[in-house]
Amino acid sequence: MLDSRQQQALSAMFGAAVAFDVSTADFCTLKAGGRAAAFIEISDLDQLSALLGFCRKEGVCRRVIGRGSNILVTDAGFSGVLVRLAGEFRTVRQRDEPDSIVITAGSGCLLAELLGYCRRHGLGGLEFLVGIPGGVGGAVRMNAGAFGHWLGELLERVVIVGPDGEAQEKMRGEWSCGYRRFTIDGCDLDSVIILSADFELQKNDPVLIQQTLEKYRSLRREKQPPALPSAGSFFKNPAGDFAGRLIEAGGLKGFRVGGAMVSPIHANFIINTGTATATDIINLMHRIQEKVEAETGIFLEPEVHII
Ligand SMILES: Cc1cc2nc3c(=O)[nH]c(=O)nc-3n(C[C@H](O)[C@H](O)[C@H](O)COP(=O)(O)OP(=O)(O)OC[C@H]3O[C@@H](n4cnc5c(N)ncnc54)[C@H](O)[C@@H]3O)c2cc1C
């Protein structure tokens, strides 16, 4: 927790961009979660350096979040500072190479904004991300993917800041990524902040890009529950199978713990029916894991980051 001196120091540094004792339900798509001691929207590198310096000096923990679409804070709360990148971290820049075009997207940029930019400028490749409600930094961290593609396929470079506050660039070959996994050797990604990401894209006709976006959008509509609060697929698919199939086979569609329910439409979605606490969601997660493991021997690993 932050004491009043620390709160005053943060207020002096960040003014209206800092809020104290916030409900994390307001920052995540599950619309549930404990309280965080502080939440700060950071607009530029100077502010970020100042915050990281403060956290180091004061021994305060901090965690960067994006759009909160794959995260849940337990009801015990988060005793440090939640950070969201905005301002200059929300821009998209473009560089033309002989055979391709490289765009640099700030981590605070929404995937929807990035896809809008690509469509307007006739840049194809990232369309499979349509409908994923995250930001660029969160999507890199999760190696977000859909329809047989993932972000890492097009990722060329990331700029990161480690706990020491130094920005460094990492090129393809210096990270490894797989199914919902992005790792950089020697880095604890929970304490690393991804500032921006470069993607190598191809010129394409904006009309064709729009058609591809529409195709993926309608496939999504067919499979996903309507807009009830969720974090998308809650569990990773085990090798060679689908978490949703295993949960459905366990008779758990519609199963509830408090206000949390297994979606009757897509069994791998845990939805907040309106009153779910983080504890309800976590208890439901455990009930699902126990039942599926007892019946199949498979332990379902959550995709959602629980902090
Ligand atoms: C309706 C729905 C559908 C979804 N469909 C899909 C899908 O098809 N495919 C898919 O892959 N995912 C899907 N998701 C999950 C989610 O949208 C993605 O994982 C998304 O990429 C998370 O981005 P975010 O900005 O919301 O990250 P958050 O949820 O805010 O954070 C996720 C993790 O990334 C870390 N993080 C965030 N920003 C940064 C940063 N700048 N630097 C370092 N770490 C960071 C956080 O600390 C956390 O550990 C879906 C979610 C919903 C609600």
Image: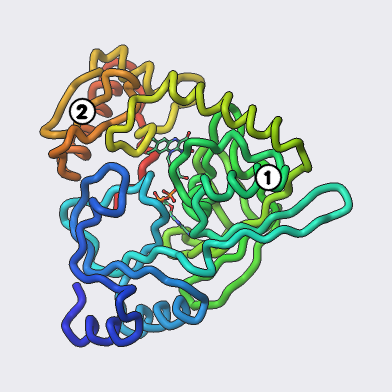
Q: Residues within 10 Å of mark 1 (few under 14, many from 20)?
A: some
Instruction: Name the residue type under label 1.
Output: Leu
In the structure shown, which secondary structural element does the residue marked by tag 1 occupy? loop
Q: Are marks 2 and 1 in contact (CB under 8 Å)?
A: no
Image point (31%, 36%), residue name: 230
Q: Residues within 10 Å of mark 2 (few under 14, many from 20)?
A: many
Colour scheme in use: rainbow
Residue 269 or residue 204, whichever sits in front = 204
Image point (58%, 24%), residue name: 215
Which residue in the protein does label 1 denote? 154
Tell whether circle 1 marks a residue whose Cβ is less than 8 angstroms from ligand 1: no
Residue 248 pos. (x, y %): 31, 15
Residue 178 or residue 36, whichever sits in front = 36
In-image side of 152 versus 249 (left or right):
right
Image point (44%, 43%), residue name: 133
What label does residue 261 carry, if any? 2
In-image side of 291 versus 134 (left or right):
left
In the structure shown, which secondary structural element does the residue marked by tag 2 occupy? strand
